[in-house]
Amino acid sequence: MDTEKSSNIEEEKIKEAETEPAAVPADRQAEEERHRKMDGYIEFGLIFILGILIGIAVKTEANKRITIGFEDYQMKLAKQDFNINQLQFEVTKRGMEESEADRQEPVETAGGDADGNQTGN
């Protein structure tokens, strides 16, 4: 009978061991948590350094291309594709010509003359 009890107990222990997940030692869990935290700090640091480097690169390029302020007179004047003053003059002239043309040629309405009088059959 002792052998049956001991075999039953062993079988129960085996079943429990099969159904329970393997227990991870507390030291190992703490170590994994420490590594996760350390990885987070390292990632944060790398992103911070990358941001600084990108900022320096953008500022350097901006200084090369954008000049606003006291030293504007020292800039090299590049040829511009458009002369805004000339474009404004042409648009204004065209608008004036169109408005004069509208005044001279009254628009006929359907079924009537230029004055709005009805012409009927």
Image: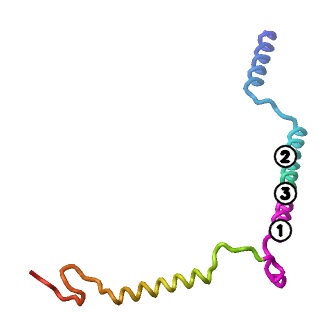
Label 1, residues with CA under 10 Å away: few <14, some 14-19, many ≥20: few
The mark found on residue 59 in the picture is 1
Q: Position of residue 16 (x, y in %)?
A: 75, 24
How is the rendered protein coloured?
Answer: rainbow
Bounds of the magenta segment: 49-76
Cα distance in 3D space between marks 2 and 1: 35 Å
Residue at (64% x, 79% y) in the render: 83
Local secondary structure at mark 3: helix
CA distance separating discs 3 and 2: 21 Å
Callout 3, which amino acid?
A: Leu
Q: Can you say whether 117 is above or below 110 in the image?
A: below
Q: Image point 66% across, 72% down: which residue?
A: 81
How far from the left and from the top, in percent, is residue 108? Answer: 25, 82
Q: Can you tell which of label 3 and label 2 is closer to the viewer?
A: 3
Query: Residue 7 versus residue 51: which sits nearer the camera?
Result: 51
Nearest the viewer among 76 and 118 is 76
Answer left or right for 105 relative to 5: left
Q: How many marks?
A: 3
The quadrant of the rendering that contains the C terminus is bottom left
Q: As displayed, is residue 60 above or below residue 28?
A: below
Distance from the alpha carbon under mark 3 to that under mark 1 = 14 Å
Of pointers 2 and 1, the one earlier in the residue sequence:
2
Q: Which residue is mark 2?
A: 36
Q: Which residue is mark 3?
A: 50
